[in-house]
Image (cartoon, rainbow, N blue to C red):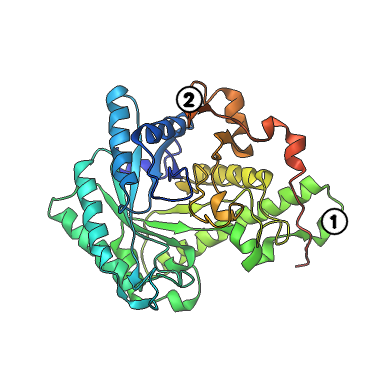
Amino acid sequence: MTAEKILGNPKYQAICYGGYRTQTRDDEPTIAELKDDMRILAAMNIKIIRTYNVHHAEVANLLKAITELKKENANFEMYVMLGAWIDCKNAWTTLPPNHHEESERNAIEINEAVRLAQEYPAIVKIIAVGNEAMVKWAASYYVQPGVILKWVNYLQNVKKQGKLPKDLWITSSDNFASWGGGDAEYHVEDLNRLIKAVDYISLHTYPMHDTHYNPKFWGTMTNEEHLSDKEKIDASMMRARDYAISQYKRVVNYMKSIGINKPVHIGETGWASLDNDLYGDRGSRATDEYKSGVFYKLMRDWTNKEGISCFYFEAFDENWKDSANPVGSENHFGLINLQSEAKFALWNDVDKGTFEGLTRNGKPISKTYKGNEKALWLDVKTPSELVTH
């Protein structure tokens, strides 16, 4: 299988993956734990996963885990979109970030990504240069498009030299705005060159975040006031899906406006099930298991129908992301929580026996709320603002 055959193929579902189980990435998941996770994802028909960086042991161990599973079962299939983290000079330090120079670590990250792709050519099918590394709101680390372009060109040249598989695809995974779907400030010549240089565009779209930052689609329309709470929420979630589609189309339109036509896939989208701040009960009231489950289904249905890969964010909850705030949204994007419970999005899979015989952290996969939908609905809030347009 090649990236060209995998991406856009509904038989090869995609997801974003991190296997950390504690509040720190110093606690690396073991190979046995990684194998458990891969068995669970394979049971869900996930066949390609996206990772984010190579400077932790997790990704190298993940590739070993997949290799072992393939040896144990010749029919086991799992491929990897390997992320190489890119950031600017002084990122994550006490010094002010310099967005016009790059971190010295970038070269180390790229070289390790090359090494892993060379070692595991049957598994690594894509290398993504950077994660939300160009979008301006990534204020602590973003770089200019020229930095991403430099490393994409470098990898394409390594490929031409025969040092990487010729069918390995190279991209960058970034916010839709960074790919030309946003303001004119992003429409620079280096971006146009980058779009020409990548094998496909991997864009991110997050309607959930825009229930706070740009809530034009969120809330109850004036002609919906007579609906039940569930109907109001379902209508809002349909508009959230349509909002994601519009961002996708804006990137496609920009790409075509500069005379290019190549595949465009979704590198990241998701909907958290809990938050105590901007998206929770005191904010836009967007986060709960019902809404996150509806968004998951709507996005899978749309992308499968259109032949678009959707690397849904994410497979499992990870609580290192906002370790100081256990109920912050960043810790609750997973489809399965840290108690080995499938959230509402996957309740049907539990019913169908998808996870039978599989465990995570020694526990079988059960349902959140013990499968009681009435109990779940006690935590579901209807967006209160009226949308008048």
The type of residue carrying mark 2 is Leu
Q: Which residue ends up furthest to the left in the rendered image?
A: 161
Label 2 and label 1: CA atoms lie apart by 44 Å
Earlier-in-chain disc, 2 versus 1: 1
Whole-percent x and y of residue 208? 61, 57
Tell me what residue is drawn at x 82 percent, y 61 percent: 222
Q: Is residue 308 visible?
A: no
Q: Quadrant of residue 49?
A: top left
Helix, strand or loop under label 2: loop
Label placed on residue 213: none
Please tell me the numbered disc located at residue 358.
2
Q: Quadrant of the C terminus?
A: bottom right
Residue at image location 59% in from the left, 42% down from the top: 297
Residue at 47% across, 45% down: 22
- The foreground one among 24 and 82 is 24
Q: Residue at x 37, y 76 (%)?
A: 99
Q: Nearer the viewer, residue 29 or 162?
A: 29
Res. 174 visible in picture:
yes
Relative to 3, say whether 328 is above or below: below
- Eye-nearest disc, 2 or 1: 2
What x and y, as percent, mark residue 59?
A: 32, 45
Question: What amino acid is at disc 1?
Answer: Glu
Q: Residues within 10 Å of mark 1 (few under 14, many from 20)?
A: few
Q: Which of these two is toward me, 218 or 115?
A: 115
228 shown above or below 353? below
Q: Is residue 229 left or right of residue 62?
A: right
In the rendered image, residue 118, in percent from the top left (x then y), is placed at 19, 46
Q: Position of residue 260 (x, y in %)?
A: 36, 64
- Find residue 225 and name its label: 1
State which quadrant residue 108 falls in: bottom left
